Structure formats: structure tokens, C-alpha cells
Amino acid sequence: MSMPDGNARVITFAQAINEALAEEMRRDERVFIIGEDVAEAGTPFKVLSGLVQEFGRDRVIDSPISEPGITGLSVGAAMTGMRPVVDIMFGDFITLTMDQIVNQAAKIHYMSGGKLKVPMVLRTTLGATRRSAAQHSQSLHAWLSHVPGLKVVVPSTPYDAKGLMKTAIRDDNPVAFFEDKLMFQDKGPVPEGEYTIPFGVADIKREGTDITLVATSSMVQVALKAAEMLAETGISAEVVDPRTTFPLDKERLIKSAIKTSRAIIIDEGYERYGVTAELASVIADGAFYYLDAPVKRMGAMDVPVPFSPVLEDLTVPTPETVTHMAKMLCGKL
Amino acid sequence: MTSKIDPSNPHFTGVDREQWIHIYQQMLRIRLFEDTANELYRSAKMPGLTHMYSGQEAVAVGVCEALRPDDYITSTHRGHGHCLAKGAKPNIMFAELLGKAAGYCRGKGGSMHIADMDSGNLGANAIVGGSAGIATGAAMSAKMRGSSQIAACFFGEGALGQGLLYEVMNMAQLWQLPVLYVCENNLYNEYTHYSETTAGDLLKRPQAFGIHGEEVDGQDVRFVYTTALRLVEQVRTSQSPAFLQCNTYRFHGHHVGDIDRTYYRSKEEEAQWRTNRDPLTILSEWMMAQEIVDQALLADIGHEIEGETEAAVQFGLNAPYPDVSEVNQHVYA
Ligand SMILES: Cc1ncc(C[n+]2csc(CCOP(=O)(O)OP(=O)(O)O)c2C)c(N)n1
Ligand SMILES: [Mg+2]
């Protein structure tokens, strides 16, 4: 895993996001946060705790429950010199913001012939198995990845989350930033000092030689656990994390698949027409002559996310299902 | 000629003769622009369709004349009037309508997406009500940056059906944002009379949020302008929103191709408005009565703007198309 040397502390994913926002708000007074329960409450997940104390209610703005409204407001503010970070509490609620994100934010730069810019970040969540049922559990990042004009970030570690958030805020385009809500309390090393991570650079989270597991966001830990289990059976798996679905580091994905000759794509969005389909086609296309097996896709089951734990757990890839698929591709079942 | 504005009418005092003449010129500029755009369509020189503003000129001009050059506007699918009234150049606009590289958006936006940051125009918008967030966000940004700019948000009465408008009006009043909502009630949502789609009294909607609202005769630019002057001043100094309902009528079809319209409005109704409620006639007759202008001056103005419009459309017709290499430029900033 790439990480600069230096004094690394171990902090949570939530703290990493919080630090990135605080640092950027200190650096650039145009940055502000707007969303439901973002100020004193610090969001239901407490990711923003403490920011209102430092930056005040004019820069950490508690909004009405108006997702289209706050997104639209942010588009207008971004076009006229500010750099808003709009907080959409659950990824499922981006459906409400769709016109403002897809028809406005994403297109304004192009439609104006390059004259107007919309430097804004839309922070939201993804991920199931929190027993939150069908309207609070979806991973809809594919929807926004589909739209030209948007960039989409899907970090999987505290280190990546912080560096990518800082890049997102500095980017002159609308950026959607998806955080796995089950990951907020996960810990990882994060250097003391200032750093950013460029978009469109995949990270090799574990090196291997027999099979490539391309995994995003919540699925990176699943893939890493699967890689460990596979190692015990003599299969060396490489875990590649694209970190951003757009821009997409096609080269690194293809290179890894060429090296290992097999690939599985694992992503928590619905499998149908999803991120897994796009990434699989990139590899099938770019590594065709080097592949020893068809590229396989593992996404969320194509059902509304059920509430009952015994059902919900069936809908997402797990280390066991990934291991099974990998063994099959490697002819070791 | 000396200024002879009726001193007994409190609305019209304090506006000098040159200003009324300028207002007339601006309205005529829009009328001739639209007639020419219609001709471009009829002679198959213009790709696509366009929505003519003819009949509503007093609204755009009355409001924009009350704004400062650095104030913002957002506009609609029926946007040429707002664009010209805020200071855009007809030749660059024709180039845009014709998909030419010299257009405001390098031909990428077309009739429904003209944006011109130099004149404070944040863009026409082809999503009904879609720019309410942008205008309100621009007002928020102006307030945050400590500038004294305001934003005027133009929309048709059809946008009253969109929830976004109420979300942002709520926030504009909550946070005291300097935005003027300008509702142009031209009686029709496309091909349906607004009374079939809109319950209750329109002005009660802003009033429900505690937003000051007024209604004017949108065919009489004297009322629109003097009311807008007052409201713009109020919005700017009190840093709070206001709402202006302008009752108006579009003389042509919903768009240039909407020729047979008797199924939704009668020829008699159209003739009534054209004959008795033409904003250009209302202003010019009053200016003649007040001896602000005479026939000769009106004729001179007419010739001048006809010539200018003709030159502008020729500029657009002669301008080159964008190079094909531009197709994927400006997707990202
Ligand atoms: C969200 C959305 N729905 C529908 C349309 C199609 N449409 C274009 S203009 C229009 C009527 C708009 O009426 P109004 O807002 O009163 O504006 P007017 O055309 O009268 O100027 C409709 C329905 C659209 N462009 N956007
Ligand atoms: Mg209308």
C-alpha cells in the first residue's frame, strides 16, 4: 500500500475525513459545509464533530431537509466563487439531488463552453449490512460515475480518505465522495503532515501473482480478507483499489490483470449495469490476450436491500464468496 | 426635447428621459432578435428549436435595468430576453443559436443554455425551475463574500410546480439571502393553462415563507421597472429575498414550431394581447404622449436596431463552426 514515510498516527476513517475538511477550511476561506445536522450534531455519524466550534455556523451550516435545495444552492455558490461541501446524509438520498448534480453541476462547464466552473464536493455514504433496510443501504456511486462532468471518489482507508478529500476540495469540478458508513470507525495509519492523493491513480493494496481482485470502497477489506484466505490455499491474490471510479486508472487495472491472468471485480453497488461491469470490460478489453479465465463480477445482489440480517447478508460479496470465486477461476475447487 | 414624465404619477418620477428611451431600445432589441430567430428557424438555418420571448420584453428589461452590471441573473428555456436585457451582445448570441464557435458557449450550449459571466448571466436553464438553486446559491455566495451583489431568478409560472423553488425560498428567507424571485406568469405551462395546474393564489406562496411579494402588470415596463428598482434596492440593503410576479403573455407559440395552438388558446385571445397589451406599444405611446420621443425618433431607433440585428445575424451566419476537436473539450475544468 502506498503511503509516504513520516510520523504516522493511527486514526479512524471519520477522523481522517474530519481532518481533511478542517485543514482545507483553514487553508481556504471559500470552503464551507452545508447539510442536515452537520453543525453541533456533527452528522449522525459524528464525522464532522468539532468543526462548527472552530469554523462557526456560517461555515458549517445546518440546513433544512432539502437535498435538492442545498445541492442547487451549492452549485450556485460554487459558480460564483465559493467551494461548498454539501453533505447528503445517506447515499440513497442522492436520488433527490439528481437534477442539480446531473443536469446542472455536471454540465455547466461544458454547456458554457468552458467559461463557468462548479468546484463543489458532494459527500455521501454507501454500503449495506447495517440493518438499515432498502432506503438507507444502497451503494449508488455507479449512477454518478455514469455522468460526464462528474468525478467520483470511493476511498477505502483513512489514509486514502484524507488525501482524496483534500484533492476533491481543491478540484475545480463537481466531485462526489462516497464514504462507507461501516468504515467510519475503522482505523489506519495517517501521516501527521500535509498530503494529497491525486485522482485516477489506483493503489495496489496487496501484491500477488495468481489472480487480481479489483475492489472498491467497502469491498477492499473484503478482498484483503479473501486474499489472506486464498494465501492459505496457495493462491497469491493481488488487490487493486481504483480509489476513484472516474477518473479511472485503467492502466493499472489492466497491468495487474496481465500479470496475474485472472480478475474478479468486487463492488458493493448493484451488479446489474454497475461499476463491476465497467471495470470488467476495461480488463477484458485491455488484457484479453493474457487472460486465462473470464473476468468475473461480484456486486450487490439485484434486489432492494432487505432488512432481515439473514437476508441482507446474502446480498453483498463476502471474503468467503470471493474466495470461492477466486478458487474456481484458478481451477482449485 | 425636455423630460416630461407625469409628476402626478409617483411611479414614474425620477426616471430620466434617456433611461426610458434606453428601455425602449432594449425591448425592441429583444423583439427584433426573436423575429430574426424565428426567421432562422423557418428558413431551416437554425438547428433545433427556440422559445421566443416576444410579448414579455417588459419583464426582462424592467428587471434587468434595475440591476447592477455585476448582479447575477439566472434564466429559463425562454431566455433570450433576459440575456439581452442583462447586456449580452446579439451577434455572439446568434452565433450561439447557430452552433458556432464564436457563440457565448462556443456553440455547445445553444438557445437554452446561454451563459455570460461578463454580464452576470449564470445561464439559461432547460430544466423548468432548475436554476432556482443556482440563483439562491449565488445570492448566498454574494453574502458570504461580503459583496453587495444580488441575484435575480427568472422563472415561468410553470416552475411553481417544482419543489426546488420552495426549498430554496425557505432557505433564502431563513438565511436572509439577497435574491429577487421573478415569476413571469404568461398564463401557460407549455400547452396548458396555468389555472389547470396551479392551486390557490400565487403570491401567497412566497408570503407563506414571510417573503415580501408584489404583483405588477408585466406588459407595462414603467411599472415593472419602477417596482423592480424599489425591490432590488430593498433586497440589496436589507439583504433579504423578495418576490415579483409579473403578469404577461407570450405572443408566439411555446416554441417556434408551435404553430397550430387553437386547441389551448384562441386566436381572439392572442389578438387581444397583441393589439392592446404589446409592451412596446404601451411604452412608445406613453413616451409620445409625454413628448419623450416623437415619430421620427422612434423611426430612427427602429432603423438603428434593425440594422444592428441584421448585422448580428450575419455575423452568426458567417461565423465558423467549432473545430471537431472541441467535442470532448470542457467536460472537465
Ligand atoms: C423539469 C422539466 N419538466 C418539463 C420540461 C418541458 N417543458 C419545457 S418548457 C415547459 C413549460 C414551462 O412553462 P413555464 O415555466 O410557465 O415557462 P414558459 O414556457 O411559459 O415561459 C415544459 C413543461 C422541462 N424542460 N423541464
Ligand atoms: Mg408560462
Image (spheres, coloured by chain):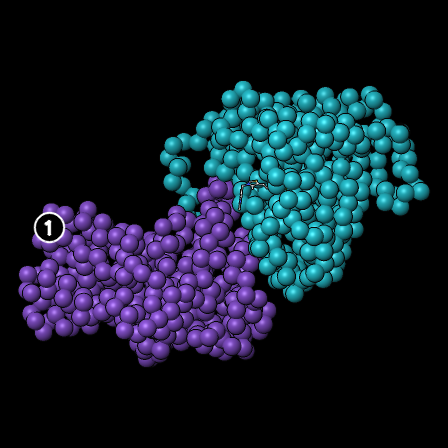
Q: State the residue at coordinates (73%, 42%).
A: B247
- Regarding residue B235, the answer to whether it shows in the image is no
Q: Position of residue A328 (x, y in %)?
A: 10, 62
Q: In front: A207, or A215?
A: A215
Q: Seen in the image, is B263 located left or right of residue A195?
A: right
Point out residue A40 in the picture as x, y percentages from the top left corner: 54, 77
Which shade of the palette goes to chain B?
A: cyan
User: Split into 4 quadrants, where in the image is the N terminus of chain B?
Assistant: top right
Who's the residue at 79% across and 30% down the image? B276
The hue of chain A in the figure is purple
A1 relative to B264, above or below: below
Horizontal relation, residue B266 to residue B19: left or right: left
Q: Dividing the picture into quarters, in which one does residue A162 lie?
A: bottom left
Q: Residue at label 1?
A: A290
Front residue of B159 and B114: B159
Q: Residues within 10 Å of mark 1 (few under 14, many from 20)?
A: some
Q: Secondary structure at mark 1?
A: helix
| Residue B134 appears in view | yes
At horizontal 30% and vertical 74% (from top left) the residue drawn is A309
Residue at left 12%, top 70%?
A: A230
